Amino acid sequence: MIIQEKAKILANLKIIDKYYKVVLFSSQIAKGIQPGQFVMIRVTETTEPLLRRPFSIHRVKRKKIEILYEVVGRGTKILSEKRPGEYLDILGPLGNGFDINLKSGEQKPKILLVAGGIGVAPLLFLAEQLIIHTLRPSAILLGAKTKRQILCEKEFKELGLDVKISTDDGSKGFKGKVTDLLRDFLSTANTQQRVTIYTCGPRKMFREISLISKEHKASIFGSLGEYLGCGVGACLGCVVKTKRGFKRVCKEGPVFDIDEIV
Amino acid sequence: MPNLSVNVGKLRLKNPLTVASGVFGWGEEFKDLIDLKKIGAITTKTITLKPKEGNPQPRIFETASGLLNSIGLENPGLDIFVKEKLSFLKEIRIPVIVSIWANDLEEFVELTKRLNRIRDIDGIELNLSCPNIKSSKTKDQRVRLIAQDPKATKRTVKAIRRVTSKALIAKLSPNVTDITELAESAEDAGADAVSLINTFFGLAMDWEKQTLITGGLSGPAIKPLALRAVYEVYKSVEIPIIGTGGIMNTTDALEFIMCGATAIGIGTANLVNPKITIEVIDGLRNYLKNRKIADIKELIGSFHHS
């Protein structure tokens, strides 16, 4: 059930540089939302910018929805200037979310979470839910440009997870991209055990992850960050080419088995 | 209670609201968000005889108060539409207008013949004006629209008119020198109504991806242009006009009606505010009530008479 709701802003804080976190009070949407699903936010009542903006859910605490976002353009700039007490018109829950249910008889895989930059946003909520489903991830690999931009290290550690870090400049952890860190990590891993990787980010990163994990019979589920129109599956603006034809990112996605994406 | 009902040819709408073809999908996408049966009529996404994959990405791009799209008429084709989408539309119990497009006249006629046999379909909107499809029949790289050629428009509408008794609506393009000529051609050929306007040829640069996107421009940016088209066409034809183009609220809807639209189609605004159709219906009703106007038909074209 998709709901349109006026959600009160409880907090809207700058984390570091261009990264912010907004906390919304949502009496309805928070209830049924799953990791990997998203909301469409109307950041202005004017026509500039015109379209809603999609945001994945960072964390849900009862009726509070947390959204971690990066200021990348006009929409997120306006969002970052909103004050507590103001209301946002939000639409959700949207999309399929991460499928975290094992098929019957299926053995528990080794689970890795991989995120570069703002791609970490939906993975905290996912990690919490995986733990509840007794599918504790083996590690979370976090990539950032530099030490100060590493997001959510503390939150993942509080969940008791093994946090591996890469920075482009080597100011903390592994020097290089998070995909290089993944390669390094997998090179020491047992190739016999089934690996499931959950990730979020641009398609280019998915392709790299897919190549890197080829020898590991890995299943890789990625949440695509795409340009969306309606968010409800009507306009067909967001489609992505898969092995079974065009699929809507907002409806059949945003989470795809990335080997399906052409 | 003021009377909101209007007639578009044979179609009787309980209020002047319909949706512009495309952005509203098959209706079912909005079922959680609004009470669909409150809408005057539903206009489907354009269907074709055979399934159509649509254009590759980029398909949409936001511009200043506007939206550029190049979906390319992706749709499952007539058979799957009838099998999987129509029953939902029928259940809403409001008039269903099916938008259609075809590669050539023969296919248009074939598609119409088959739709004509289906009782649950009330109207057919001829999409003569999709700006995003190149002809597959010629090597011509330019996009040519039937709705850019008065003779072709007349020929097409006439041929289709012969094979259907359903309400026939010609959707026209603003990408012409004089849209009134095209409206007159459609009227002469027997169309019950004209729907105007489809989107404008547009182009934007996506600097981030370093690509160009060409497509059809819609949204509030085009409203004054659409309004002018409705205003001019009202002066030149007798048949009703369905006005579309950048309607974002009740005031916009009123302007279209007062410029000459009998019904109005809401397009891009559905993406911004999924409740827009219902809000405008309520807004129109309140306007009439507050002004003590008994019937919305008194407002149609009223700018011309003042």
Image (cartoon, coloured by chain):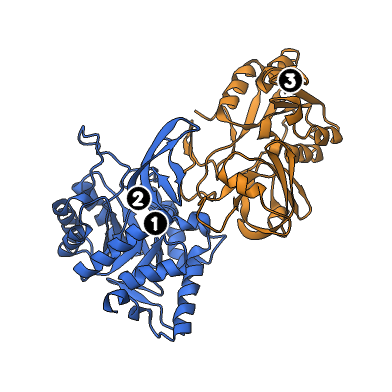
Chain colours: A orange, B blue
Q: Residue at x 38, y 48 (%)?
A: B217
Q: CA distance from mark 2 to mark 1?
A: 8 Å
What residue do we see at 17% from left, 50% from top? B149
Q: In the picture shown, does residue B143 fall above or below A235?
A: above
Name the residue beneath numbered marker 1: B44
Looking at the image, is mark 1 or mark 3 nearer the viewer? Answer: 1
Which quadrant is the N terminus of chain A positioned in?
bottom right
Image location of residue A110, percent across then percent down: 75, 25
Residue B50 position, x and y percent, is 32, 43
Q: Can you give x and y, in whole percent of width and height, for residue A161 in the image?
A: 83, 30
Q: Find the residue positioned furthest to the top.
A: A187
Q: Horizontal and vertical percent for residue B43?
A: 38, 60
Relative to A219, B205 lies left or right = left
The crowding category of the residue bearing disc 3, from other C-alpha atoms within 10 Å (few below 14, some 14 to 19, many at least 20), is: some
Viewer-nearest residue: A49 or B149: A49
| Residue B94 seen anywhere in this rendered image of the structure | no
Q: Are marks 3 and 2 on the same chain?
A: no
Give the amino acid type for the residue marked by disc 1 in the picture.
Thr
Residue occupied by mark 2: B47
Seen in the picture, residue B256 relative to B129 is either above or below; the reply is: below
Q: Are marks 1 and 3 on the same chain?
A: no
For label 1, the SS is loop
Instruction: Give left or right: position of B160 versus A28.
Output: left
Residue at position x 45%, y 42% from top?
A: B61
Contact, mark 2 vs mark 1 (Cβ under 8 Å): yes
Q: Amino acid at mark 2?
A: Ile
Q: Is residue A259 visible?
A: yes
Q: Is residue B175 above or below residue B289?
A: above
